[in-house]
Image (cartoon, rainbow, N blue to C red):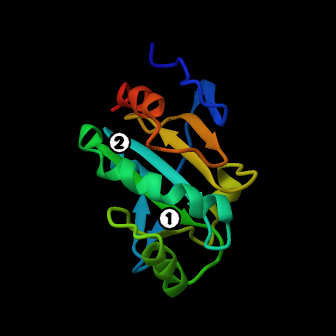
Amino acid sequence: MADEAPNIKNIVINKELKTYDNIAFLDINEKIIKLSDYKGSLVLLNFWATWCAPCKEEMPSLDALKANSDLSEINIFPINIGKDNSEKSKKFFKDLNIKYLDIYFDNPVTLAKQLGLRGIPTTILFNKKGEEFARVIGSINFEDEEFIHWIKKYN
């Protein structure tokens, strides 16, 4: 059953699917990326900042998740909400040897407020219909076999 959570304490499964209007953020060139353009795909929005130690710890495993050939349909957007500039963000990715992920930024409308984030890192998972079905509150190891097995059901 897809709604059975993996045995990972940080994952919160929504009892009811949540939909949002007009979720948008920016790529590194300030081009607007709309979540609605990714309907039909599994989407993970990961909120982070360069000064966040747990973010630093989890980012390499998120990069590995993106590289996982069993999850080729997954779209992962690491969105910097720490008001860090692009140079600082690029250095963060370079220092951690991040190869498969791109950097995104929250736009001035602030998704953090719109999505009710309480802290970072937070990862919000959207199904193929664009509905939020789960959140990861805090950091996890995205290479965890149980997590991968669970997330494949949505892919």
Residue 25 shows which numbered tag?
1
Q: How many marks?
A: 2
Viewer-side residue, 61 vs 104: 61
Outermost residue on the top side: it is: 1
Residue 9 higher or lower than 100, as above or below: above
Viewer-side residue, 40 vs 3: 3
Quarter of the rendering occupied by the C terminus? top left
Q: Position of residue 152 (x, y in %)?
A: 35, 30
Q: Is residue 151 left or right of residue 124?
A: left
Q: Secondary structure at mark 1?
A: strand
Mark 2 or mark 1: whose residue is earlier in sequence: 1
Viewer-side residue, 39 vs 94: 94
Task: Identify residue for label 2.
Answer: 39
Circle 2 packing at 10 Å, graded few (<14), some (14-19), many (20+), is some
Query: Please, what is the three-letter code of the amino acid marked with disc 2?
Result: Lys
Viewer-side residue, 31 vs 60: 60
What's the residue at 37%, 52% (across, down)?
64
Q: Position of residue 33 (x, y in %)?
A: 41, 63
Q: Position of residue 17 (x, y in %)?
A: 56, 28
Q: Position of residue 134 (x, y in %)?
A: 57, 34
**Separation of residues labelled 2 and 1 (CA atoms):** 16 Å
